[in-house]
Image (cartoon, grey):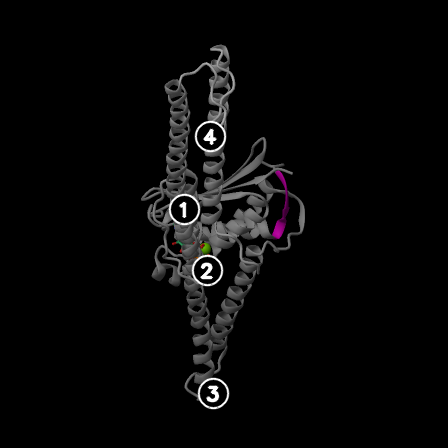
Amino acid sequence: MKKAPTLFSRLWLAFLAVAVTSAGLTGYLIGQSVYNLFGSFLGMSGMMGYGPQDPMPGMTRAMEQAAWSFLANVAWTAILGMLIGAGLALLLGTWLARTVVRPVEEMRRAAGRLAQGDYQVRVPPVETAELQALAMDMNALGEALGRAEHMRKTMTADIAHELRNPLTAIQGMLEGMRDGVVPPDKGNLEVAVAEARRLGRLVDELRVLSLADEGRLPLERVRVDVGALCRAVTGAWGKKAADRQITLSVEADLGAFVSADENRLAEVLHNLLANAVAYTPPGGQVWVSCHRRPADVLVEVANTGPGIAPEDLPYVFERFYRTDPSRARATGGSGLGLTISKRLVEAHGGRMWAESIPGDKTTFSFVLPVS
Ligand SMILES: Nc1ncnc2c1ncn2[C@@H]1O[C@H](COP(=O)(O)OP(=O)(O)OP(=O)(O)O)[C@@H](O)[C@H]1O
Ligand SMILES: [Mg+2]
């Protein structure tokens, strides 16, 4: 690639051009006006014609010398003024060019280190407003890249960990059967099948997430009555809730239509209800509500119980996040349910969020634009 001129040399050349042009112009204008004014003064005094070879008529030798020394003085003062002005302009220009170029250089170095994967690098504060904004954007970029890299690394570790558990269980069971230590009866085979299903579910969920990440999640959109769907899904959780002595109620406006993939939407509701039922202590309550509003449909799934601590709340939608890993492990959760639900709602053009009052209740809400 052709070597481009440096920013410093360009700025410096621009300042040089300005300094030389303004000094030249000032000199020319001063010369012109002195020439004209002095000429007309001499003309008015009746002493026309002047020049070293052209003795001024009507002037004494002393007057003539005084006139020439005046002109020479004016010329030298103008030249000195021009030189000092041009010198100062160049000095200031060099300083200004440096103050612009130095932060740009630092940012270029930082960008180079970002490109090499050093996401800790930060650009120091700069004095110019525009460059300060650029430095802040670069620092924000570094932080975002660092977070993304950290998430990528932990995600790989989490996926490996999650796949390992059911795999180890299946492997142990099969090896036990082969070695004759575990009887290949129906009960043991059921355990192995359940673990294989868990593995399959996990792989499916990861696939949905990666499709959603790429914005390629296929949605079979139809006109869906969200209210009716809320009632149907809540009904399906009736028995499970009753088994855990949880009161389950639903209050849903019928005729709240949206254009959505019905199965995906049902999946979101099942995920939220599964959580609500799983994380509500026995004797608690779960409410589902669906309200039609002018521009969207609001669905809320709330439950009583210890709730989610404020420090955990911002992370519940992150992959594999569990507020209490041991408890979630006991309920068989992998920590993907909410991540997928949020992505599915967003794929439909909606939003999902969580609110929790610790010790009182937790509400998961989402809105979908009406069709
Ligand atoms: N209604 C709720 N009340 C209290 N805590 C909740 C509630 N819903 C979710 N959580 C917390 O958020 C975490 C993440 O939920 P998420 O549904 O994503 O994963 P999970 O239920 O653990 O596993 P799964 O992938 O099977 O859904 C849960 O582990 C739980 O700690
Ligand atoms: Mg869940």
- The overriding secondary structure of the stretch rendered in magenta is strand
Could you tell me residue 103's position as x and y percent? 39, 48
For the residues labelled 3 and 2, the Cα–Cα distance comes to: 52 Å
What's under tag 1, amino acid-wise? Ala
Question: Viewer-proximal residue, 5 or 360?
Answer: 5
State which image quarter holds ligand 1.
bottom left
For the residues labelled 2 and 4, the Cα–Cα distance comes to: 52 Å
Magenta range is 257-263
Q: Which mark is residue 178?
A: 3
Q: Is tag 1's residue or tag 4's residue first in the polypeptide sequence?
A: 4
Could you tell me residue 305's position as x and y percent? 35, 46
Q: Which mark is residue 135?
A: 1
What's under tag 2, amino acid-wise? Ala
Residue mark closest to the camera, 1 vs 3? 1
| Contact, mark 1 vs mark 4 (Cβ under 8 Å) | no
Secondary structure of the residue carrying tag 3 is helix
Q: Is mark 3 within 8 Å of ligand 1?
A: no
Res 109 seen here: yes
| Contact, mark 3 vs mark 2 (Cβ under 8 Å) | no
Question: Viewer-proximal residue, 327 or 141?
Answer: 141
Residue mark closest to the camera, 3 vs 2? 2
Q: Is tag 3's residue or tag 2's residue first in the polypeptide sequence?
A: 2
For the residues labelled 2 and 1, the Cα–Cα distance comes to: 16 Å
Secondary structure of the residue carrying tag 1 is helix
- Number of numbered labels in the structure image: 4
Question: Viewer-proximal residue, 184 or 66?
Answer: 66
Q: Is tag 3's residue or tag 4's residue first in the polypeptide sequence?
A: 4
| Contact, mark 1 vs mark 3 (Cβ under 8 Å) | no
Q: Is tag 2's residue or tag 1's residue first in the polypeptide sequence?
A: 2
Could you tell me residue 91's position as x and y percent? 37, 41
